[in-house]
Image: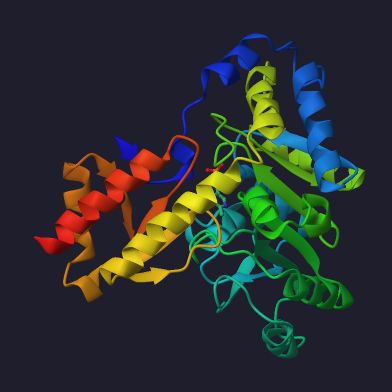
Amino acid sequence: MINLYSDTQTLPSSAMRKAIEAAEVGDEHSRSDPTTLSLERKVAELLGKEDAVFLPSGTMCNLIGVAINTSPGDVVMLESNGHILRSETGGPAIVSNVLTDPIEGHRGQFTVTQIEEKLDQTSRYRPPTSLLCLEQTHNFAGGTVWSIDLWNEVCSFAKSKNLRIHVDGARLLNAVVASGISAETWASKVDTIWIDFSKGLGAPMGACIAGSAEMIDEAWLWKHRLGGAMRQSGLMAAAASYALDENIERLREDHERAKMLADALNELGAKVVEPETNIVFFDMKPCGKHNEEVVEELLKNNIRTSEIGNQIRAVTHLDINDDDIDSTIRVLNQIVNN
Ligand SMILES: Cc1ncc(COP(=O)(O)O)c(C=O)c1O
C-alpha cells in the first residue's frame, strides 16, 4: 500500500523501536520518568519556552491550551478551517465552556484588519474575546506556512489587545524546514505552542505543549483532570526524542515529493493547491473525472488518498519514497487517459 492518506500513517522504524527498547522509565504521574522529563526539556529548549509537558495527543494539547488561556464564557478566535474547530468534536466548548469566532482565512492565514473588525464588534453585551489560535502549518488549507511578517503583525496586534495566543503546531517543524525560520522564532510571541510527534516525525504517539512554567503547571492540572497523566510514558517519549534527533531535517524530502506530485498533477490538468510542505490538495474535475471515482481507482491500485470537501488530499511522509510518487503519478495518468 502506498499510503498517502495522512502523515499520521507512518510506522516506527527499527531504529526507533531500538530507542524505545532502551528507554529508562519511571512513573510519569509523579514526574519521575527520566526519558519523559528529558523530552520535555528538549522541547522547551527547541521552542524557547520555560517548560513543556508530554501529552498523549495533539488534540489534548489543543484542549488544554484553550483551557489554560481562557475562562468560561470567553470567545476564542481562530481560522474557519482550523483543526480545533473542524476536527476536534467541539472539545473547547465542552471542556472550557468557550465560544468560537471563526475568521475566514486565505490559505489558513488572516490579517490584523480581520481581527480588528471582529474586536470592534465587542460591546458590553458581547462575550469577551480572550484567545487567538493560530495553526502552523495549516492542515486543511494545504499544509500552508504563515509568512513571518504576517505572523509577527498578527501576534503583536493580538498582544496589544491583551489576547492570549495559542499555536496548534501539529506540523510546526514542517514550517521550520520550509521557511528556514527556527521553531523558537515562531514561538517567541505566543503563550502556548505544541508540536506533534505522530505526524511527519514518525513516532507512534504523543505531543508536547510548551509555555511559561506557570502555564505548564496549570497544564498539568488539566492533564490529570482529563486522564492524560501516564505511567511509564518514557517508552513513547523515547520514540519522540529519537524523532526530534533524526527526523526533522528529512521533512524536506517529504516537501520535495509533494512538489513532484503537484507538478505531475498540474501537467495532467488537475486543479492543484500548490504545496508549501507535505500536503497536496487537488481537484480532478478539470480532467473530466469525479474525485470520488479517482480516490476509488487509486485504492484499487493500492494507493490510499482521501476526499476532503470537494478535493482529494495526498500527504507525503517518511514511509513514502520516490518510487511511490512515480507509481502514483503513473496510475493517475492511467485514470485520466482511460
Ligand atoms: C493541524 C492539526 N492539529 C491537531 C491535530 C490532532 O493531533 P492528534 O492526532 O495528535 O490528536 C491534527 C491531526 O491530524 C492536525 O492535523
Q: Position of residue 297 (x, y in %)?
A: 16, 51
Residue at screen point 74% across, 66% down: 131
The answer to whether residue 261 is above or below residue 61 is below
Residue nearest the observer in this picture, 47 or 177: 177
Res. 193 visible in picture = yes
Q: Position of residue 215 (x, y in %)?
A: 85, 47
Residue at screen point 77% across, 36% down: 53
Q: Is residue 201 left or right of residue 3?
A: right
The answer to whether residue 228 is above or below residue 158 is above
Residue nearest the observer in this picture, 9 or 31: 9
Q: Is residue 169 left or right of residue 265?
A: right
Q: Residue furthest left?
A: 338
Q: Position of residue 114 (x, y in %)?
A: 67, 85
- Say which quarter of the image contains residue 110: bottom right
In which quadrant is the C terminus drawn?
Answer: bottom left
Q: Position of residue 261 (x, y in %)?
A: 38, 56
In which quadrant is the N terminus drawn?
Answer: top left
Residue at screen point 87% across, 47% down: 48
Residue nearest the observer in this picture, 21 or 97: 21
Residue nearest the observer in this picture, 70 or 147: 147
Q: What is the basis of the colouring in this image?
A: rainbow
